[in-house]
Image (cartoon, rainbow, N blue to C red):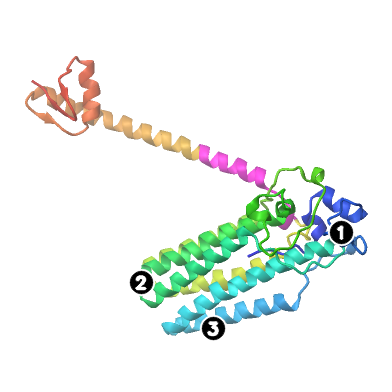
Amino acid sequence: MATPATSVSTALPSPISSAVSRGSNTAPTPSGQTPSSPRVLDANQVGKFYVTMICWRLLNTMVMLGLGIFKAVVTYRGQPTAPKTLDWVTGVVWALISYWMALFEADSTQGLAAGYYNLHVRITPCRCVNTVVVLSLGVYKAVTTYLGQTSTSTILDWVVGVGWVLISYWTDILEADNPSLAIPDFGPWFFSCDFGGRKRVHFNRPLLWYKPHVDITPWRSLNTIVVLGLGTCKISAAFRGQTTVPTTLEWITGVVWLLIAYWLGFSEKGDPSWFLSRDISGALSFAMLAILGVVGVLYVLFVMYLVLSSIPMMWQEYSLCLSSPKVLCIRRSSICDIIAARRGLWDTFSLYFVFQ
């Protein structure tokens, strides 16, 4: 789900935000319009940061919480049809409505930062692909669920609810952290093309020559780990035939944690706290390399242990082969080949050895 940028000046690169605050010719202004006044939405200058509780956000929270509780109740009561219908309504229909409303908030807020109203949502290929994938997989999951195919439904539940949700989550973060991706003829076509037919904001190109980067904050890392962990635990419990544990984990992930992530998403760009704003990508890269290095060393040591521990047994088998020339050595043929080659026994045929 896209995260609207509450503080837009922090969402834009520093050269662009400074241009916006000066109101110069390089400020983002659509064709035929001029900013009414330079507006700077900076939480540090305005005062203490807070999240705006607009009607849509409260409505979204109430709907998700209500449908989630209702689905959990009917599932615990053993009703077969109602949970499937609510799963499709909440996980597909309302999720797509909330997704596009969040994009509408984010795209409109970028226009307000420059002093004009831009009540338009960009219909990009990336967003269309996300919508089509969620809709098609959701419909397919609903059909397989009604037909009683539990294994296919469980796998699709993990693919949509964990795999694709995390892909969409980090794609939206990439768009939010790099506004230049949305500029026509500058950003990639997958992010910049607008099928809605509206011309987007034009920036001065020399200000935008920087490499796109995604801030890997502690909150984003924690969100990814929690969703991946709870989703994996849920699918494992479902394949084991448990009914209560998957329902509980689904409610925790799809309602409680989803609402926590939904409201914390509005605070990312304006809250200067370490948990929401600090980029720990360097530390994570070092930690991943260290973990891979330790795993690699342990793997090499384990292989060496297996080889060294099997040498005495292989030598005994080879001695048995030498004492009985008519014996056909089948097991460990490759190692027998190496030892036999050293002793001048070159009468090897394929994988079998016949010692005469």
Tell whether position 121 is magenta: no
Secondary structure, mark 1, is helix
Quarter-of-image position of residue 80: bottom left
Residue at the far top: name it.
344
- Residue annotated with mark 2: 149
Q: Is residue 180 above or below residue 316?
A: below
**Residue 234 seen:** no
**Residue 107: numbered disc:** none
Amino acid type shown at disc 3: Phe
Q: Nearer the viewer, residue 199 or 137?
A: 199
Rounded to the nearest angstrom, the CA distance separating label 2 from label 3 is 24 Å
State the predominant SS element of the stretch in magenta.
helix
The residue at which mark 3 appears reads as 70
The amino acid type of the residue labelled 1 equals Asn
Position of 64 with respect to 303 (left or right) is: right
Distance of label 1 from label 3 (alpha carbons):
41 Å
Q: Amino acid at mark 2?
A: Gln
Mark 1 packing: few (<14 Cα in 10 Å), some, or many (20+)? few
Residue at 57 percent of width and 57 percent of height: 167
Q: Quickly name the residue at label 1.
A: 44
> In the rendered structure, which disc, 2 or 3, sits on the residue that comes first in sequence?
3
Quadrant of the rendering where the C terminus is positioned: top left
Could you tell me how far apart the alpha carbons at marks 1 and 2 are, in whole angstroms?
54 Å
**Magenta highlight range:** 274-293
Q: Are marks 1 and 3 in contact (CB under 8 Å)?
A: no
Give the left or right position of residue 234, taking residue 48 as reference. Answer: left
Q: Is disc 2 surrounded by few (<14), some (14 to 19) or many (20+) residues within 10 Å?
A: few
